[in-house]
Image: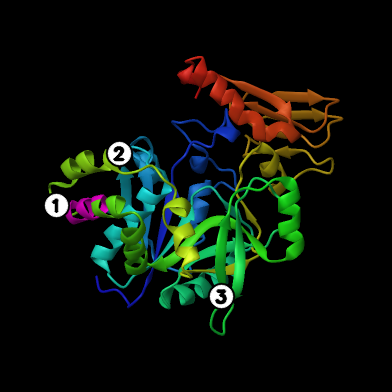
Amino acid sequence: MSEQRGALYGVVLAGGTGTRLWPLSRAGHPKFLHPLTGTDASLLQATVDRLDELTDPHRIFVVTGVAHAAAVSRQLAGVPEENVLVEPSPRDSCAAIALAAAVIARRDPEAVMGSFASDHLISDKAHFTEVIRQATAGAQQGLLMTLGITPTRPETGYGYLECGGVIGDGPVLAVAEFKEKPSYDVAESYVKSGNYLWNAGMFVWRVDVFLAELSRQQPQLAAGISRIAQAWDSPAREEVLGEVWPTLPRISVDYAVMEGAATVGRVGTVPGDFGWNDVGDFHTLGEVLASDTAGNVVVGHTDENKPGVLLRETEGLVVVPTTGRLVAAMGVRDLVIVDSPDAVLVCPRDRAQEVKQLVDQLKDAGELGYI
């Protein structure tokens, strides 16, 4: 199949277990496979659907783990099965992204690649599409592009991008530095300055530029990925993957490549404001999905013939019914209530970020069946 020069390929990273959405999100059925979008589509399906004006299904790749490959292929009937790249074990985002870049480069050396998380919600698809097109123009010029989100509050849960000057005559800004998740006071100063964007973990670049930068900064990882890519379309794929993959460093693409590239002026960004949310916990899920007049949110579609959820004199609840059992609440406010077949979670909404600690406690106790 002949490709247009510099065509955009979409790469979706479908990894992680979303421990702050426990007990809904589990190792065996992580959050990206769940319909948390306010529609019947899963987060993964919504991520792929969002790219339909930018690329074709045969140019969409998904990187996922062994445990989820079958479910991913089932949910994404339009994506060719050979485009689901299965990593034998989690090695963090750099190895996953590099594998996709190397496989795409063998097919189309001039390709531009966009990398997207599988578990983000975006409400303004038209503006998102426009921003990706602007980022693609920056990528064509040889920049490693990262999408920055215009901050709406001093958020301590995200990393930030410190912006430099305008590059060229378009909307592309230089990224001077990647900043770690800040304290509240530092986050407040970032937002007030108007010079910082949230780091959304979405990237656009030419595959050749990214792989060259990877070789410069992470030669061991780059060499390993190159060996795997060379064997990808051969009978030796599984053998080489099994031998090389476990030796690759576990490192995020921000640490491995983007921070070092920014210090030498190779990273650009396009500010975006397209209703982005990373669905990190039940509280943020409650903020983005439709609520009733008292601010209660019921997640997921329940059977119309059964009440599913019965609320009386409640405010600001996030209720997640998954079992068909009736969930009833009365006289309470600002709680998260999650009913799953083998575990029930109740916690205040303002402590939803801490749910991960319960998962850690279960791990420490050896109760892996609940994880």
Of labels 2 and 1, earlier in sequence is 2
Label 3, label 2: how far apart the Cα atoms are: 37 Å
Label 3, label 1: how far apart the Cα atoms are: 40 Å
| Residue picked out by circle 3 | 172
**Based on the displayed image, in which of its 4 quarters is residue 280 positioned?**
top right
Q: Quadrant of the N terminus?
A: bottom left
Label 3: how many Cα within 10 Å (few below 14, some 14–19, many 20+):
many
**Colour scheme shown:** rainbow
Residue occupying the point 59% across, 64% down: 125
Of labels 3 and 1, earlier in sequence is 3
User: Is disc 2 placed on a helix, strand or loop?
Assistant: loop
Callout 2 touching callout 1 (CB < 8 Å): no
Q: Position of residue 229 (x, y in %)?
A: 23, 55
> Is residue 248 left or right of 243 when viewed as pictured?
right
Q: Is residue 219 visible?
A: yes
Q: Position of residue 191 (x, y in %)?
A: 73, 59
**Based on the displayed image, in which of its 4 quarters is residue 198 positioned?**
bottom right
Q: Amino acid at mark 3?
A: Val
Callout 3 touching callout 1 (CB < 8 Å): no
Of labels 3 and 2, earlier in sequence is 2
Label 2, label 1: how far apart the Cα atoms are: 17 Å
Q: Position of residue 177 (x, y in %)?
A: 56, 61
* Boundaries of the magenta span: 224-231
Q: Amino acid at mark 2?
A: Pro
Label 2: how many Cα within 10 Å (few below 14, some 14–19, many 20+):
some
Q: Which mark is residue 234?
A: 1
Q: Which mark is residue 160?
A: none
> Is residue 140 left or right of 365 when viewed as pictured?
left
| Residue picked out by circle 2 | 88
In this rendered view, identify the residue nearer to me: 82 or 216: 216
> Is residue 183 left or right of 343 when viewed as pictured?
right
